[in-house]
Image (cartoon, grey):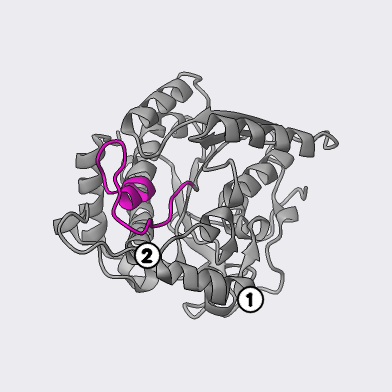
Amino acid sequence: MAAAAVGPSSSSPKGSKTSNKPWARTDIPDLTGKVCMVTGGTGGIGYETAIALVQSGAQVFVVGRSEERGNEAVEKIKNAIKLIPSAGTVSFLQAELGSMASIEEFAKNFNAKELALDILINNAGISAPPTRQTTIDGFESVMGTNQLGTFAVTGQLLPSLKRSTAPRVVTVSSAMAEHCQPLDFEDFQTERKKYPGHKLYAQSKLANMLFTVELQRKSDANGWGISAIVVHPGLVKTEMTAKRDTLFSKFIGVAVLPFLGQEAAVGSHPSLCAATCPTVKGGEYYGPGGLMGASGNVTKLEIPKNAKDVTAAEQLWKVSEELTKVVYN
């Protein structure tokens, strides 16, 4: 891998490039000695993110809910790096983001290792099912997994993150968040209104953006040293995309994905750039710079206006604390 990273193409709020050389996987620096974690790393974008980090020399922990799939992913990565002398190591850790007890146990065991967690990539998430479902804890499943699970994982791992000299927390969101309705804190669990399907998925991704903005603000205020970055992968051909059940998602899968979709390896580029590029700063947002943000070179983007709402970010943090019982300190 390259010894020094090349900065991603930057952009105006409209996405116009100002740099001639796009970011590439070969720009990932030597990560020997770095400890990284990728949630949802057993397949799709997460798997491609994990393998690139291992290839670059990092000690990588792949997190997922299925032990069988986790072990398969680890063996697949090990086979892929056999001929790379400078490659790092990979192992699997089991955690269910829809269970606060599972997250607590997983984080307790990891923190006991007393490792400095340099890079946490919050990649795990679910798409919207056709009808309202709940997690083990009774939370609405989409917001409960994508936001509350992400919030709990990051908070429970804070002791390990603070051991690092320059920890980064990268959270995978979606460009769908830009135009969605504001979060409804009066009905956060979608118990009273009609189930909104894919619109709720977009709101969960807006929550991820608000979470990132507030995490950076709290890190700066409390001296945690965390650089919190949010990314969106673009339109990616993954198992998660293929299995979406709502009518809107089926339309995307048939009419849009075959023409604008990109492979999972390319979809991992924003996460990898945000996690490793030296020029990336906390509070920034990265994603593809092509047509409708579906594909293209990694580009620094303008955080959407609805994700800069300080009041909404603070309220989301408070609600997340109350529901998960996880307090950052």
- Return the x and y of residue 326 as percentages of the image width and height: 27, 35
In the image, taking residue 21 as reference, residue 229 lies left or right, namely left
Q: Main secondary structure of the magenta part?
A: loop
Can residue 140 be seen from the camera position used here? yes
Residue 305, located in which quarter of the rendered image? bottom left
Q: Is residue 139 magenta?
A: yes
Can residue 303 be seen from the camera position used here? no
Up the image or down, 267 lies above or below 253; here it is above
Check disc 2 and report the residue beneath it: 198
Q: Earlier in the sequence, mark 2 or mark 1?
A: 2
Q: Amino acid at mark 1?
A: Phe
Secondary structure under the numbered disc 2 in the rendered image: helix
Q: Amino acid at mark 2?
A: His
Name which residue lies at 48% across and 68% down. 250
Distance between the Cα atoms at labels 2 and 1?
A: 21 Å
Proximity of marks 2 and 1: CB atoms separated by less than 8 Å: no
Q: Residues within 10 Å of mark 1 (few under 14, many from 20)?
A: few
Residue 325: mark = none
Count of residue discs: 2
Q: Is residue 317 magenta?
A: no
Name which residue lies at 58% across and 70% down. 257
Name which residue lies at 60% across and 76% down. 290
Q: Residue furthest top?
A: 112
User: For the magenta stretch, what is the residue range?
Assistant: 124-147
In the image, taking residue 94 as reference, residue 56 lies left or right, namely right
- Return the x and y of residue 49 as percentages of the image width and height: 62, 48
Q: Nearer the viewer, residue 61 or 64?
A: 64
- Return the x and y of residue 235 as percentages of the image width and height: 55, 67
Residue 265, located in which quarter of the rendered image? bottom right
In the image, taking residue 237 as reference, residue 172 lies left or right, namely left
Secondary structure under the numbered disc 1 in the rendered image: helix
Residue 259: mark = 1
